[in-house]
Image (cartoon, helix red, strand yellow):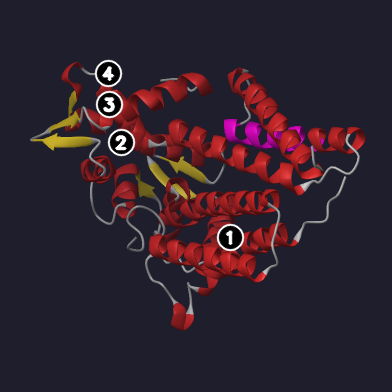
Amino acid sequence: MTPSQASFAVGALGLVAFLLLGLVLLRLPGKMAPVSRLLLLGLAVHALGTLLAAGLLAGVTYWHGAALYWLGFNVALFGFSAVYKSVSLRILTELAVQPGGTLPLADVVAAHVRPCFTARTTLLLEAGLTREEGGRFALTANGRRTAARCGRVQRCFGVQRSGLYGDAA
Amino acid sequence: MNFIPSPPIAAGLVAGLVLPALIILLAHGPWRVAAPGRRFVVAAVLMVAGWAVALIALPACPAEDLLASAMILATALLVGFTLWTLVAWGFTVSLLMTLARADGPLVFDEWVRRYTGGKDVGAFAHDRLGLLLKLGLARLEGDQVRITPGRGRPLARVVSLLRGVFGVPA
């Protein structure tokens, strides 16, 4: 086995370890967001795998295994994020379990669309970026600073107005 | 352990790092591509083309190096696309920016209206469904939404399976 093939093997083993540990970690109770858990686990598994490979396999290359590992990690994270957060996929799976596969549009709005707004506004409240007083929402000082930072990043990347109703896609 | 990247792998790393710079370049001035989606696609095409030219210019490379380089490029595209969707279309960030643009505090429905450019939650539902309808995963029949048996149901099964694997509540 060449050093680059050994490196691919190290990357593949690391990826399998990440996937198995990730499935366990996602099921454990805790406050940390699932994506943050997976990111930290991904870094930890990669660091450990690299240290072990460096100690056990003389002359093994780093980049071949790292390329395989991080591609697999990102594909897994992308897939997880899609099924975890996508409103469209939630609507689709809800339709699939209905008799005849149909739902009134009003039910879709009530069950999925309004809750997806309230989930995001709750997230902003819990993060201390907004506050609610008498049913009215406003930015906190922290929220204004965060919005200013986001605005700078968006302007740098030429985004005038983000979101589904922002710059024409 | 050898941390020095071979020339093809270095080409993949450089191409990946160039992607955000290309997006910024295409966001301003004479090369501006106005639509965010098209801007990312143009930047990605330029990145892949530059990478391919660099590989052609290199002397014969081992297949393992080419494979690793392509994997690095694919990773850069995936990470770049994920970050770009957050910057250009991120839902939570866009709600925050909508509130930042408002003159004062907003009630919930007004916040939604400002985000959607004057539409209500029902119109937003139509727009979210637009993706499912455009891809042929569902269709509108009057005021009913129906999943399509050919495309929608198989994808719904895959999504449900992945939810089970990842432990995401249904």
Q: Secondary structure at mark 4?
A: loop
Residue shown at 57% from the left, 65% from the top: B52
Per the rendering, the mark at residue B161 is none
Relative to A105, does residue B53 appear above or below in the rendering? below
Which residue is identified by label 2? Answer: A113
Name the image quarter holding residue B47.
bottom right
User: Are discs 2 and 3 less than 8 Å apart at CB?
Assistant: no
State which tag comes first along the sequence, 4 or 2.
4
Which residue is identified by label 4? Answer: A97
Rounded to the nearest angstrom, the CA distance separating label 4 from label 1 is 42 Å
Which residue is identified by label 3? Answer: B153
Count numbered badges in the picture.
Answer: 4
Horizontally, is B51 left or right of B134 in the view? right
Residue B105 location (% of width, % of height): 40, 51
Residues at discs 3 and 4 both on one chain: no
Residue A72 location (% of width, % of height): 60, 38
Identify which amino acid the numbered label 1 is placed on. Arg
Rounded to the nearest angstrom, the CA distance separating label 2 from label 3 is 21 Å
Q: Secondary structure at mark 2?
A: helix
Identify which amino acid the numbered label 3 is placed on. Arg
Q: Which residues are magenta?
A: A33-47
